[in-house]
């Protein structure tokens, strides 16, 4: 059969691809969207949304268990109260199914006229694709514009025996119906931390094995220490500086992970093992060689500031190109390409703010520079920290763990902030807006915030600014 010609083809129903398909179709382009798994990609099906939905269940359980902290009657002792994991997973499935249905209905809306193909796409030439459809058929397509939005999957580290012990990825853990008795987590990054607290609050014993000297390698030591202390208080165990080299399963079914650590040999035995040591790009099975599309040595597709690959008309959006991996950045990739193609407005993907939040309790949020980065880049700064417990709202709610850390430049404008504490992401957004508006710190210091909200802390956090970097 001859190839079907489109104006634009999108491979992967990710966070950039979905809105781009709609925008291009509404601008009159003939668009095809190809997805091999579930519409909505990782964020909706096995990333952000399912995780945060289950974290909400864990958080509610924690509130009930800790009700005595605010002198409310205790409804059950911490040891008695266990999650109904099957029900929690069913609730999560309902939430994400509704999101997925929303995407399907948008993509298949008659007036959008998007051709939705469910199957695996691979390049056969620079502007041609072959699709192995889920129904067993195949289809060839061509287009002058092709957008690769194929995302990532769990990277599996080189640990002897790992393949044989029946480890879990987050995708599998999110669907588990029976609570692990003791969950070992390989990796203390975003995923390791969020899942550790979720499953701890569900009632599992948790041990995190992390190869680095600190959690969250990009953050300042004091922030990582604060977060580790908070998680340790909830009973999460950490084995740091640990190089896992072997995994084995005993006849009774338990899993043992052996690791060399800075304090000697460690063996951790548990019932389940989650691998959360990073991601790898879904670029290995999409025929990049046939199109001549270049990648870095890890397989991430190289792009210029406008997200164009080295092949004319082919773009790479979202996690598949090198750089930080977040839904809000993938979505911004969509905006960059939409504006360039449909509105003649060019914006660089390199010059954009990078806000992010680790959804632990307390959460950790960051915008702009950390202290470590300011030092590394030799940027002059003044820095102040303020413990959460000094904020009125913290005292009212008994949520006193954490601190805020702010960096100010020579011109009194904000360079960055790292917040560890309740509603950290929301306060970070306030700071982000102040940075976008180029406000000086004194303006936040003197701003009237409603009493008694968390943001009131911004009146005080800059009080003890001191020159940093010495
Ligand atoms: C557990 C977890 C929690 C996360 N939590 C957060 C969070 O709280 N906040 C945040 O900002 N980010 C979070 N992320 C990261 C976030 O999910 C991603 O950054 C985001 O989804 C960007 O994805 P994308 O647009 O690059 O593609 P994706 O959403 O990954 O979509 C890629 C799609 O392409 C499809 N595909 C791949 N190859 C082919 C092919 N050859 N043919 C057809 N289809 C193909 C895949 O099936 C997939 O559906 C989390 C990630 C994980 C794993
Ligand atoms: N809240 C959020 O925004 C959120 C939540 C989850 C995931 N994500 C995204 O997903 C990405 C992947 O998350 P992740 O946690 O898998 O990766 P990560 O890169 O954040 O963390 C991986 C951790 O594993 C450690 N590690 C690597 N190899 C190891 C080994 N062999 N043994 C023990 N530890 C090892 C690393 O030192 C690192 O601390 C993140 O970078 C983030 O972009 C975001």
Image (cartoon, grey):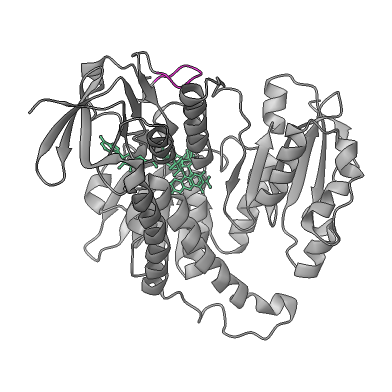
Name the residue rendered at 32%, 47% in the picture.
Answer: 110
Query: Is residue 220 shown to the viewer in this render?
Result: no
Quick check: 388 left or right of 162? right
Residue 336 vs residue 433, the one in the foreground: 336
- Side (left or right) of 354 relative to 135: right
Vertical comparison of 87 with 242: above or below = below
On-image quarter of the C terminus: top right
Relative side of 277 to 466, left or right: left
Q: In this view, does 188 lie above or below 129?
A: below
Q: Does 243 appear in magenta?
A: no
Q: Toward the viewer: 433 or 470?
A: 433
Magenta residues, dominant SS class: loop
State the residue in front, 166 or 22. Answer: 22
Foreground pick, 135 / 319 = 135
> How many numbered circles does the render carry?
0
Q: Give the percent coordinates (x, y) of residue 131.
A: 18, 34
- Give the residue displayed 34% in from the left and 59% down from the top: 272
Q: Give the range drawn in magenta.
A: 302-308
User: Quadrant location of residue 435?
Assistant: top right
On screen, 361 above or below 223? below
Percent across and percent down for residue 292 are 27, 14
Q: Percent x, y for residue 348?
A: 56, 21
Quadrant in the rendering for residue 352:
top right
Q: In this image, 452 relative to 370: left or right?
A: right
* Quadrant where the image shows the N terminus: top left
Q: Residue at x 53, y 64 (%)?
A: 56
Which residue lies most toward the left here? 1
- Rendered residue at 92%/44% (across/down): 446
Q: Is residue 307 magenta?
A: yes
Residue 87 in sight from this viewpoint = yes
């Amino acid at each position: 059969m001859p190839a079907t010609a489109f104006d634009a083809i999108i491979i992967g129903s990710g966070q950039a691809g979905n809105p781009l398909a709609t925008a291009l179709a509404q601008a009159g382009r003939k668009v095809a969207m190809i997805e091999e798994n579930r519409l909505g990609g990782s964020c909706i099906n096995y990333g952000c949304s399912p995780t945060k939905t289950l974290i909400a269940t864990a958080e509610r359980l924690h509130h009930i268990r800790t009700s005595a902290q605010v002198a409310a009657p205790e409804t059950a002792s911490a040891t008695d109260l266990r999650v109904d994991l099957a029900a929690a997973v069913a609730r999560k499935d309902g939430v994400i199914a509704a999101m997925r249905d929303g995407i399907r209905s948008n993509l298949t809306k008659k007036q959008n006229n998007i051709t939705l193909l469910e199957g695996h796409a691979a390049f056969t030439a620079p502007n041609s694709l072959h699709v192995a459809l889920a129904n067993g058929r195949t289809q060839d397509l061509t287009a002058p514009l092709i957008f690769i939005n194929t995302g990532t999957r769990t990277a599996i580290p080189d640990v002897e025996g790992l393949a044989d012990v029946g480890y879990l990825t987050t995708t599998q853990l999110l669907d588990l119906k029976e609570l692990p008795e003791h969950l070992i987590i390989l990796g203390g990054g975003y995923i390791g931390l969020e899942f550790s607290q979720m499953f701890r609050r569900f009632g599992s014993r948790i041990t995190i094995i992390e190869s680095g000297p600190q959690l969250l390698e990009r953050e300042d030591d004091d922030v990582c220490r604060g977060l580790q202390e908070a998680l340790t208080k909830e009973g999460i165990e950490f084995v740091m500086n640990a190089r896992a080299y072997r995994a084995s399963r005993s006849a009774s079914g338990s899993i043992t992970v052996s690791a060399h650590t800075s304090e000697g040999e460690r063996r951790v035995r548990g019932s389940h093992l989650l691998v959360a040591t990073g991601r790898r790009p879904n670029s290995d099975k999409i025929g990049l060689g046939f199109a001549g599309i270049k990648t870095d040595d890890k397989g991430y597709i190289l792009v210029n500031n406008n997200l164009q690959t080295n092949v004319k008309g082919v773009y790479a959006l979202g996690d598949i190109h090198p750089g930080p991996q977040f839904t809000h950045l993938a979505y911004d990739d969509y905006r960059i390409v939409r504006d360039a193609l449909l509105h003649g407005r060019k914006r660089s993907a390199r010059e954009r703010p990078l806000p992010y939040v680790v959804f632990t309790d307390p959460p950790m949020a960051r915008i702009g520079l950390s202290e470590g980065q300011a030092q590394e880049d030799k940027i002059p700064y003044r820095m102040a920290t303020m413990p959460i417990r000094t904020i009125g709202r913290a005292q009212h709610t008994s949520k006193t763990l954490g601190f805020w850390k702010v960096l100010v430049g020579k011109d009194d404008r904000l360079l960055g902030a790292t917040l560890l504490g309740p509603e950290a992401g929301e306060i970070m957004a306030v700071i982000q807006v102040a940075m976008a508006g180029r406000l000086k710190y004194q303006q936040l210091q003197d701003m009237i915030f409603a009493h008694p909200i968390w943001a009131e802390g911004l009146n005080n956090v800059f009080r003890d600014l001191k020159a940093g970097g010495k």
